[in-house]
Amino acid sequence: MATTYYQVELQKRVDEEGELVRWLFLVGVAIAALIEVIDTSITNVALPHIQGNLGATTSEAAWVVTSYSIANVITMPLAVMFGDMFGKKKYFIFSMIGFTIASVGCGLANDLTTLVLARIAQGLFGGGLLAKAQAFLFEGFPPEKQGLVQAVFGICVIVGPVVGPTLGGWLTDNYSWRWIFFINIPIGIVAVTLCQMFIPKDKERDENAPNVHIDWLGIMSLSVMLGSLQYVLEKGQDEDWFGSHVIVWCTVASIIGAIVFFWHELRTKYPAVNLRIVRFRSVAIGLLFQGVVGFVLFGINYVIPNFAQVMLGYTALQAGLLQMPSSLVTGMMFPVVGAMIGKVDARLMVVIGIVCLSISNAFLVPLTLDWGWDNFLVSSLVRGFGLVLVFLPLTIAAVGDCPPQDIQTAASLLSLVRTLGGGVGIAVLATVLTRREDFHRAVLVEKITPYGTESMNRLGQLTELFHSKGFALADAKARALAALSGQVDAQAATLAFSDIAWLLAAFTALTIPFCFLLTSGKRAANVEMH
């Protein structure tokens, strides 16, 4: 069976310099992917500090996150086209250098406009890193090593969103919010150096090969579709969804962009994104499950820190540490599951993983305001195990019947759908959380009446408490009512978070039947590229 250009070139260097060359190639590519993933979430915990330092409002500061997300999803599916135009290695290293320089711009920004513009640049350069990194790993390593190699990549993708807020919280608390960007400088230099040294040079272009065509209509319609959609997902809850004219117009723009994009891309001879690969069952089902992984992963990364910080009073660092057990399990299990790829049916592993994810969310249903670190532990451990069993076999099985020349496109689409799935997950869960909190508060308030013995006893106890501290009786009653209202709000929010856990558990379980539409993954483990 034929091997790829990168496998041949790497093997030549391995024969001359040893196996270390191949693994340094892996490290360089993996580092580039990791810092891109971390930067999608590292700014979340620093927004209050950025807001205060730059004199911005809460909604203005949120653009630090939104601008990056929009730019990131636009570039992601175009990475294959840019790689074909400029050379895969050249484009990858150019993106890494641009990402690092943009990080410097973010850290030096003295006003919000400069910071947002730098974040846009960071997102545009970063969008090409994740998809190209996975494509390099598919192309650079022989089939028998793909399980382990994709396991390393999986650690970056799964652990990155968890490490981001934790690292961001630590840097912000101990140094400054600017260091969440400056930390990318030494890491970026290392990644660029390793990639320059160990990624084989781009293949010489055949003089008789046709020129690469730029699909301008495809690029523009894709940008409108994804940019508008990501804005709706990021800002919908804050702006009351379709009660906002901006959200309505962005939704319309996204729909029009989608219609033009899909119509044009399926008809043109030289598409910006080759959507025709979705005709392969493994790719289509793989994209579906990547959306589920994004929904659950980013969703739970939103729910748990939110509950811990808002309801339990945790710091950003403490909230991030709540999810570290999951990351540790993921990191330890990836090599184990990687060794099973090609030997155990991928569908079986994905089913077990989905069941574990559903159970891990169900463990969060009985949460209360008295929960501590140990109460979250079992759910975190089971979730880490489930994510490994879903992500890694799914990634390999998704390219099961995909032609070798289209695996790069498949990798970029998988990254895109996972990111969009995360955006949808956060938007849906934030909306449901608000609505269920209002619902539970209304139900609880109905039960607080002058005829309710328990509520009146509680009000009396609070009134006596404030009166004993020196407040006048009328003032003590007012404070008691305010305290009781606060307790109702806290219980309503807790019940709403419990509902979210139920929703995630049920949503995850409903995807189990689709697992059987995947390929076994055994053929995918032997896939090779030209």
Image: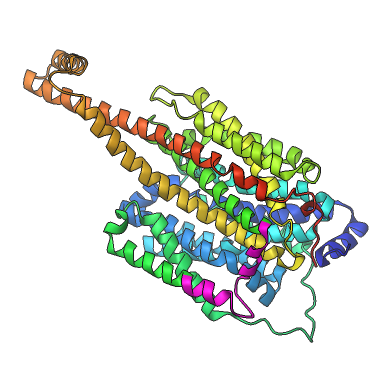
Q: How many marks?
A: 0
Q: To which quarter of the image does residue 17 belong?
A: bottom right
Q: Would you identify the image quadrant in which residue 201 lies?
A: bottom right
Percent coordinates x, y for residue 453 in the rendering: 18, 14
Work out whether 529 lies above or below 436: below
Q: List x then y, in percent, for residue 357.
A: 57, 36
Magenta part of the chain: 259-281
Look at the image and tell me whether residue 327 can be seen. no
Which residue does the image show at 64% across and 43% down from the upper left? 390
Instruction: For residue 407, say whether it is visible.
Output: yes
Q: In the rendered view, how is the structure colored?
A: rainbow
The residue nearer to you, when weighing 336 against 424, is 424
Instruction: Give the answer, above or below, for where 207 lies relative to 506.
Output: below
Quadrant location, the N terminus: bottom right
Q: Is residue 500 left or right of residue 518?
A: left
At x 55%, y 30%, the residue is 379
- Residue 202 rendering spot, x and y as whole percentages: 77, 71
Give the image quarter of residue 114. Answer: bottom left
Residue 398, image x and y in percent?
Answer: 68, 54
**196 relative position to 456: left or right:** right
In reply to whether residue 213 is colored magenta, the answer given is no
